[in-house]
Image (spheres, grey):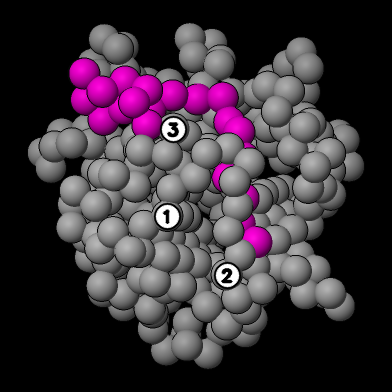
Amino acid sequence: MWTLLFNKPADSQPRMPLPVQSLTRAMLDAAPERSLYRLGHSTLLMKLRGGWWITDPVFAERASPFSFMGPKRFHAPPIALHELPALRGVVLSHDHYDHLDRATIQALAARTDFFLSPLGVGDRLIAWGVPQAKVHQFDWWQDVQVDGLRLTATPAQHFSGRGLRDGNRTLWSSWVIEDQDSANALRIFFSGDGGYFDGFAQIGRRFGPFDLTLMETGAYDPHWPYVHMHPAQTVQAHRDLGGRWLLPIHNGTFNLALHPWWDPFERVLALGAEQGIAIATPMMGERLDLSAPHAGERWWRALVPKAARQGTAAAAQAQPR
């Protein structure tokens, strides 16, 4: 904790602004079905069955209980919170500050039909003023069907809490999102946060294969291997799930770890190239077609010295699996 607060390496955050593709409400109104936009960290906006869904929405300047201290954003969100369209649903993985932002939830409450959360997290939303009828809480393996979509809360290996006295009083989860269109089915896995465990293989057997996995790849360290995956574990989890495309998330927005801020991208790309895994790295705000993902540009490389990137890639390939 002392190192995180007072002795973080300089390369744990970028030295210049990150490139972001700005979005407008008009652009989203015109977006085709099955569009995905990464807005930052683990916040992803998806258009499914004509409705908009968002995961772990955090628009705050800091992932912190305080407005004046704590991990600060590397970039502004690609779209202002008030410009978001009406949402069919908000999908929440757990209650940590980089995944659950009170001000964002309160701003979305009147414009969202459903809030889907693990057990206990929904009670926080109700306490913050979200109408109880909109809040739906789930234990692992429970699901709900909305507009031809099935959303299932699935296990994760993590922890929860927003203060010193509420540790693990709420549940955490990953999510399986299925578009059950019989002619063009789509399966998406959203990891939330978590360490590597045998639950990925179990989820893969029950729901896989997946067209796209949205996988935590960031804020890892040898001191907390059970709650955040190293990139090699992210790639293995993707394989356990039977994933086709992998989109690394939980990176590129907040300074939450001791590794270089670009490290997750380079490591997972090196491992993906070695193992023949298709990896998408869209810029924040860039559209990704869920039916036909594309790799995207390696947008961070313009901000990172080549020698540093090569060192990261070499370390990834030498990492034990």
Q: For the stretch drawn in magenta, what is the main secondary structure? A: loop
Checking the image for residue 176, the label placed there is none
Q: Residues within 10 Å of mark 3 (few under 14, many from 20)?
A: many
**Position of 3 relative to 166 (above/below):** above
Q: CA distance from mark 3 to mark 2?
A: 22 Å
- Count of labels in the image: 3
Horizontal and vertical percent position of residue 9: 37, 21
Which mark is first along the chain, 2 or 1? 1
Checking the image for residue 136, the label placed there is 1
Q: Residues within 10 Å of mark 1 (few under 14, many from 20)?
A: some
Figure quadrant of residue 5: top left
- Local SS, label 1: strand
Marks 2 and 1: in contact by CB < 8 Å?
no
| Residue corresponding to mark 2 | 146
- Local SS, label 2: strand
- Amino acid of disc 3: Leu
- Amino acid of disc 2: Val
Horizontal and vertical percent position of residue 134: 35, 64
Residue at the farthest front position? 133
Marks 2 and 3: in contact by CB < 8 Å?
no
**Position of 22 relative to 18 (above/below):** below
Residue at the farthest left position? 68
User: For the C terminus, which image quadrant?
Assistant: top right
Q: Which residues are magenta?
A: 150-170
| Residue corresponding to mark 3 | 171
Say which of 98 and 149 sits in front: 149
Q: CA distance from mark 1 to mark 3?
A: 13 Å
Q: Is residue 110 magenta?
A: no
Which mark is first along the chain, 3 or 1? 1
